[in-house]
């Protein structure tokens, strides 16, 4: 009986939803991949298609234009993309932005933005990182100053996922530069025709070639005071902290899907490829490596599945989610490196799935909080 990586959290409804997601990914995302890799972004049309199919904001309530599902629906779409190394649409960042609005926004903010995010009209981005501040978020320097019922934003952000295509950016800035955490607020910026807002370079990354990652500049960008997330200044850092379990688990889900995709592609390859009169699969080293990989996936699967169930039940804490992000992203690096080795030279080619996954995997240990920061968070909970 071949090994299967079953999900403890799936059911008949989710299996049907997975079919819809897989069809969208195969029929619409995959054919768009090569042009997207060449230009560094997927374009707006594919986002609108995903919205039209009900695949965006899957876990946002229907009253705000979402599909009324839960995190499992979101994760199904990430899995279907990332097991095929299709990382161009950063749907998880889009979803994280929607969650900030849902969990912390005023009723007016939810009604104004969530339906347009669900339809794909507005692609979401969150701008925290700056050239001078990444892990140490409290050290950001982008300022938002109150001025006649408005906030005026000045500063620069970098490495922003979906930054090039974003129609809505949550800008993390200082409303009180004399404070660290308590001086941070989140402002909602609609990017279209906004004076002073500028997208910088589309950054040239080691992997995730079809995904847009950009610099963003704010030069006296003026937004109404109603665009302050939740309506109260100084709450931004705490808003960011409260949504961490979802974000960190999403990265773990993506990592598990990539490992499963790489494992399957490698198994197929070594059963077919011959050397020294036999298939690579018949060599003991190959069999042992694949046995190790399958074991790591099963172990990770058990933990991540439990985290998903806890998240859906509202019980996942930040330290446990950080363990999932830490363990899976490190395992993903090891597993995909082993898969590249088993592919030989073909594994190093960008036209092969595992070659692409090798480039994609490296960032998993850095963004969303680097591995070292995950260890700090876990250590604090000991
Ligand atoms: C492809 C990509 C997409 C991204 N998307 C986004 C996005 O959408 N929005 C956004 O805001 N940001 C985004 N980022 C930024 C990302 O979150 C940061 O790169 C990350 O948080 C690390 O910050 P840094 O690059 O400034 O590194 P630094 O903070 O300078 O860290 C460098 C190294 O020092 C280590 N280090 C730092 N502090 C400690 C400590 N206290 N103890 C031990 N080690 C430490 C780090 O772990 C790391 O290994 C993205 C980055 C990339 C590359």
Image (tube, rainbow, N blue to C red):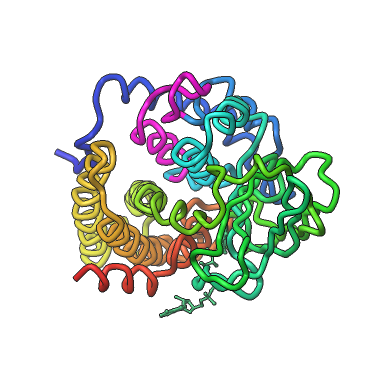
Considering every residue shown, the one lying at the far left of the view is 1
Depth order, front residue of 93/296:
93
Q: Is residue 201 above or below residue 373?
A: above
Horizontal and vertical percent position of residue 74: 41, 35
Residue at x 78%, y 48% (from the top left corner): 148
In this image, 307 relative to 345: left or right? left
Image quadrant containing the C terminus: bottom left
Q: Is residue 105 left or right of residue 13?
A: right
Q: Is residue 164 left or right of residue 381?
A: right
Answer yes or no: is residue 280 visible: no
Above or below, 182 against 229 in this view is: below
Using the rendered image of the protein, determine whether residue 381 is visible from the camera's viewpoint. Answer: yes
Task: Say which quarter of the image contains residue 285.
Answer: bottom left
Q: What is the total number of numbered labels drawn onto the structure image?
A: 0
Residue 224 in percent (x, y) is at 72, 42
Task: Tell me which residue sits at (34%, 50%) in the image.
Answer: 256
Q: Position of residue 54 (x, y in %)?
A: 51, 22
Which sits in the foreground, 137 or 272?
137
Instruction: Provide the residue span drawn in magenta.
Output: 58-82
- Main secondary structure type of the part rendered in magenta: helix
Name the one closer to the observer, 69 or 252: 69
Is 149 left, or right, of 330 in this rendering?
right
Check if residue 142 falls in the magenta segment. Answer: no
Where is 156 relative to 103, above or below? below
Q: Is residue 65 magenta?
A: yes
């Amino acid at each position: 009986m071949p090994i299967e990586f079953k999900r403890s959290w799936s059911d008949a409804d989710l299996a049907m939803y997975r079919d819809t997601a897989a069809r969208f990914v195969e029929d619409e995302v995959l054919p768009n991949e090569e042009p997207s890799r060449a230009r560094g972004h997927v374009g707006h049309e594919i986002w609108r298609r995903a919205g039209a199919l009900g695949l965006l904001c899957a876990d946002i309530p229907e009253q705000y234009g979402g599909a009324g599902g839960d995190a499992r629906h979101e994760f199904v779409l990430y899995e279907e993309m990332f097991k095929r190394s299709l990382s161009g649409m950063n749907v998880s960042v889009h979803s994280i932005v929607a969650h900030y609005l849902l969990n912390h926004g005023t009723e007016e903010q939810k009604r104004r933005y969530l339906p347009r995010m669900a339809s794909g009209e507005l692609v979401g981005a969150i701008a925290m990182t700056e050239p001078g501040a990444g892990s140490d978020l409290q050290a950001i320097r982008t300022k938002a100053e109150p001025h006649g019922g408005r906030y005026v934003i000045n500063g620069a952000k970098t490495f922003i996922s979906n930054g090039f295509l974003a129609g809505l950016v949550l800008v993390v800035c200082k409303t009180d530069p004399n404070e660290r955490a308590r001086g941070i607020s989140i402002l909602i910026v609609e990017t279209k025709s906004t004076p002073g807002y500028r997208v910088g370079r589309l950054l040239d990354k080691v992997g995730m070639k079809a995904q847009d990652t950009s610099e963003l500049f704010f030069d006296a960008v003026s937004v109404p005071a109603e665009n302050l997330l939740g309506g109260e200044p100084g709450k931004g850092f705490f808003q960011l902290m409260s949504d961490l379990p979802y974000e960190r688990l999403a990265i773990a889900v993506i990592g598990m899907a990539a490992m499963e995709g790489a494992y399957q592609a490698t198994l197929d390859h070594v059963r077919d490829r011959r050397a020294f009169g036999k298939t690579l699969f018949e060599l003991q080293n190959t069999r042992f490596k694949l046995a190790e990989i399958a074991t790591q996936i099963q172990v990770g699967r058990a933990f991540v599945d439990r985290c998903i169930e806890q998240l859906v039940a509202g019980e996942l804490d930040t330290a446990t989610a950080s363990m999932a992000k830490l363990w899976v992203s490190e395992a993903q690096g090891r597993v995909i490196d082993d898969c590249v080795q088993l592919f030989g030279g073909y594994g190093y080619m960008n036209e092969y799935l595992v070659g692409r996954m090798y480039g994609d995997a490296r960032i998993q240990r850095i963004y969303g909080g680097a591995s070292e920061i995950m260890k700090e968070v876990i250590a604090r909970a000991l």
